[in-house]
Image (tube, rainbow, N blue to C red):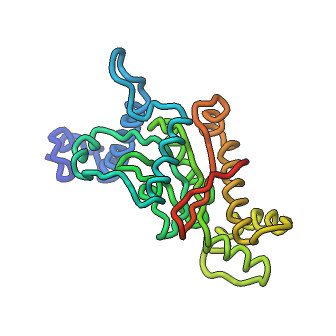
Amino acid sequence: MCEQCGNLQHERDPRMSRRTFDGTAAIAPIALWTAALARAAEPPAAGSAPPANAIPPSESFKRLMEGNARYAANSPNQRDFSSGRAARTEGQYPIAAILSCADSRVAPELAFDQGPGDLFVVRVAGNIVTTNLLASLEYGVQFLGVPLIMVLGHSRCGAVDAAIKVLKSKAALPGHLPELVASIKPAVIVAERTQSGDLLDNAIAENVRRQVGKLKNSPPVIASFYASKKIDIVGGVYDLATGKISVLGT
């Protein structure tokens, strides 16, 4: 019997080495994940109910903004968070994907007054589009069926403020922060040309607009779904003081 996997056949076949076994073990999770993606991409069976998130982008946006109004008014819906736990093990059907800043004061599920499983959230300081986050959003669109992506910035964003300081005073940042700030600098440069308003506020809004534009033009998945109007992509800014989210025009 094989000491690695317990298979009797392997004892009779000396070619089944530890390297072969380790390679097989590494491939197995990938195969399972690929199979799961294939199942997620399959259309609903004839006569079955559509998934819970099979709604137009406009309906998704409406639900988000109605939820934010409840949150800002301190009147969120009352929920039993444990009641649907077992059902959620069978799949996820988020009504929107949120690209949010990683700031600990911003909690998208709370800000939009949504329950577990309602939002597909990816977060990074400065709410910028990176390759890995783009891949996550592609997964949400292609395989989970999210009809809406919102880029969510927020007031007093430290990442944007750092980009301003780097441009104005050549401040030196440690570690990998310069790479992150470099993605935000173009928004600051545009905001500096604005004649009115606060530079930080203007740069935060411009950064959100730039990330929305980047997503709309990100092939092959997001750009295609957006061009065919299967999804919409919008931007907003969360106000830390009031809890209100202002939607930005493009």
| Residue under the point 44% across and 48% down | 119
Question: For this view, does 215 lie left or right of residue 53?
Answer: right
Identify which residue, 246 or 173, lies in the foreground: 246
| Residue under the point 62% across and 72% down | 156
Residue lying farthest to the top in this orientation: 46
- Residue 23 to residue 186: above or below: above
| Residue under the point 19% across and 40% down | 12
Quarter of image, res 193? bottom right
| Residue under the point 54% across and 42% down | 61
Identify which residue, 4 or 243, lies in the foreground: 243
Quarter of image, res 16? top left
Disc tally is 0
Q: Position of residue 117 (x, y in %)?
A: 37, 46
Q: Position of residue 49 (x, y in %)?
A: 34, 23
- Residue 197 to residue 208: above or below: below
Q: Position of residue 233 (x, y in %)?
A: 62, 43
Identify which residue, 116 or 22, lies in the foreground: 116
- Residue 179 to residue 74: above or below: below
Quarter of image, res 130? bottom right
Identify which residue, 156 or 210, lies in the foreground: 156
Question: For this view, does 200 lie left or right of residue 78?
Answer: right
Question: For this view, does 60 lie left or right of residue 116?
Answer: right
Q: Position of residue 124 (x, y in %)?
A: 54, 63
